[in-house]
Amino acid sequence: MKAGPTVASQSPQSRRNSLADLIQQVLVAPNAGTHAQAKACATIAQAFAWLDQSDERLAARHSALREKALVTALAQVLKVVEQYDLGAAITITDWLTAEREYIAKVKTAAPEKIVSKSTIIMMQGDKPRELQAGTNGFTCLIGGDGTPLCADQNGMEWVKATGARTEPPNKIGFIYMLAGDTGTTNHHPHQRDTRMHWVQTGPHVMIVGPGVREMMGYPRTLDVSDASQPYVMFPGTPYEHLMLPTK
């Protein structure tokens, strides 16, 4: 179970949240007995205490020790789950694997210098869970359609407004999608299932916000003839934005 690099790269609070997720899985697992629950949660509690100590007292050169201790703690939890037939072993393993794969995919959205200092979030239901704390103002995630993206603060406000079907803020934002998108209808972001005026774009960046309406000289047709050239997506809607292919 090589989960260390992913978990160790999280912020202290994110790591504690991750371990809290494991506790919840153990507590709600089928066939979970009181003794098994107590033993598993005690193991995780020890990991919490160690993390608190490492965050406060250990220098950066000891990051390998922090990683090793966390991996050991998670391995012990998994062993307890299997020993007492809690039925959550596959869930925990899948959780760790899914997180690793998620971060790897997110990293394709923008240049490494951007992603390495960005906040990385993963949606769990309607709530975001932070996997990496950032310092550069960008937030990276995988959208509901499977497209990885990294957006600056204004870009994230636009993304949230689009998802909530509300009026985007009157701000110009910037979004990376260097892995390309999965395709969409070009007449409206909330009618993707119709597949009308379908367009799929390769690696690109986006300029978003109402100010895009004032950027003249770019095609604003519903049917995009060449998605390898700059064009306006969702023209005539509150969500229109400028698509700038990079290849």
Image (cartoon, rainbow, N blue to C red):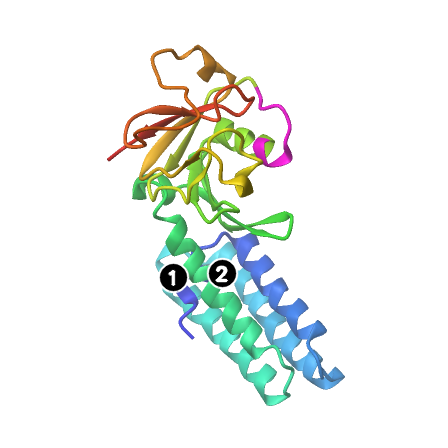
Q: Which mark is residue 106?
A: none
Q: CA distance from mark 2 to mark 1?
A: 8 Å
Depth check: give the residue in front, 167 or 169. 167
Disc on the earlier residue, 2 or 1? 2
Mark 1 surroundings: few (<14), some (14-19) or many (≥20) residues within 10 A: few
The C terminus: image quadrant = top left
Residue hosting label 2? 54
From this view, report whether residue 83 is shown above or below residue 202.
Answer: below
Can you give x and y, in whole percent of width and height, for residue 34 in the image? 75, 83
From this view, report whether residue 9 is shown above or below residue 246.
Answer: below
Q: Within the image, what quadrant is residue 22 found in? A: bottom right
Depth check: give the residue in front, 229 or 47. 229
Pointers 2 and 1 in contact (C-beta within 8 Å): yes
The kind of residue tagged 1 is His
**Magenta span:** 162-169
Point 54% across, 30% down: residue: 188
Can you give x and y, in whole percent of width and height, for residue 235 in the image? 48, 21
Residue at the far left: name it. 247
Mark 2 surroundings: few (<14), some (14-19) or many (≥20) residues within 10 A: some
Can you give x and y, in whole percent of width and height, for residue 110 in the image? 34, 40
Q: Determine if the magenta segment contains residue 164.
A: yes
Q: Determine if the magenta segment contains residue 131.
A: no
**Is 179 on the left-hand or right-hand side of 238?**
left
Point 65% across, 82% down: residue: 86
Residue at the far bottom: name it. 83
Can you give x and y, in whole percent of width and height, for residue 84 in the image? 64, 88
Residue hosting label 1? 62
SS state under label 1: helix
The kind of residue tagged 2 is Ser
Report the magenta stretch's main SS. Answer: loop
